Image: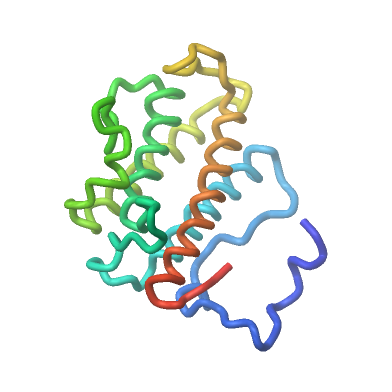
């Protein structure tokens, strides 16, 4: 982290009302590798939720950047599937159905938005909770699993970093989508 992280935003910079005073965990600057990685992942989870806060349910499915099929609703569905795929299905070896995915319709998380937005958030929060418990129960970040697709070995450390990168990418998408919906931006 740079010294710039401690500098408040410029007076003329419009902060998102959804982020002002929001309950987002502070990122630690010291700690174990597990503490740092899980804190960053939880920060990104909270950031995603904040970027969606206050958007009317009927606007969550808006495709704000054509021809892309991205929407906030689709991102919620996608990230629920990401959490389940990496932590429960891969790492914990749970035999569960995929969320919002099939070989016949691999993009249904973004394209089949006929479901309830609140149900999508409930599913995402549930999967985040399962992932947190799985990570907390692992004796070490060195514990490995095998990819269900390639068979290659992956450590829990890799899965955490990979998931942080996934959220970072999609938080950027969510920021743009939110700005298109109502002009709200944030950090």
Residue 167: x and y, percent? Answer: 51, 48
Q: Decide which of 13, 64 is in the foreground and name it.
A: 64
Asked whether, in this view, residue 6 is left or right of residue 77, the answer is right
Asked whether, in this view, residue 74 is left or right of residue 174, the answer is left
The image quadrant of residue 7 is: bottom right
Residue at image point 55% right, 31% down: 159
Q: Is residue 126 above or below residue 89?
A: below
Total numbered circles: 0
Residue at image point 68% right, 78% down: 9
Residue 42: x and y, percent? Answer: 52, 51
Q: Quadrant of the N terminus?
A: bottom right
Q: Is residue 107 above or below residue 68?
A: above
* Outermost residue to the right: 3
* Outermost residue to the top: 151
Residue at image point 38% right, 63% down: 64
Residue 38: x and y, percent? Answer: 57, 44
Q: Is residue 173 above or below residue 78?
A: below
Q: Quadrant of the C terminus?
A: bottom right
- How is the structure coloured here? rainbow
Q: Decide which of 146, 35 is in the foreground and name it.
A: 146
* Outermost residue to the front: 67
Residue 117: x and y, percent? Answer: 24, 57
Q: Decide which of 57, 26 is in the foreground and name it.
A: 57
The image quadrant of residue 157 is: top right
């Amino acid at each position: 982290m740079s010294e710039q992280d401690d500098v408040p935003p410029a007076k003329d910079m419009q902060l998102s009302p959804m982020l002002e005073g929001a309950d987002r965990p502070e990122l630690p600057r010291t700690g174990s590798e597990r503490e740092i990685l899980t804190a960053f992942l939880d920060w990104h989870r909270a950031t995603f939720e904040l970027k969606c806060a206050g958007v009317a349910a009927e606007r969550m499915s808006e495709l704000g950047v054509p021809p892309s099929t991205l929407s906030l609703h689709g991102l919620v569905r996608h990230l629920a599937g990401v959490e389940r795929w990496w932590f429960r299905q891969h790492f914990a070896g749970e035999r569960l159905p995929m969320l919002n995915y099939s070989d016949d319709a691999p993009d249904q998380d973004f394209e089949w938005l006929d479901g309830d937005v609140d149900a999508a958030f409930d599913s995402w929060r549930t999967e985040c909770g399962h992932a947190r418990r799985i990570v907390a129960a692992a004796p070490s970040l060195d514990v490995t699993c095998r990819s269900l697709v390639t068979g290659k070995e992956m450590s829990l450390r890799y899965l955490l970093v990979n998931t942080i990168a996934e959220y970072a990418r999609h938080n950027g998408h969510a920021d743009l989508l939110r700005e298109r919906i109502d002009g709200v931006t944030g950090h």
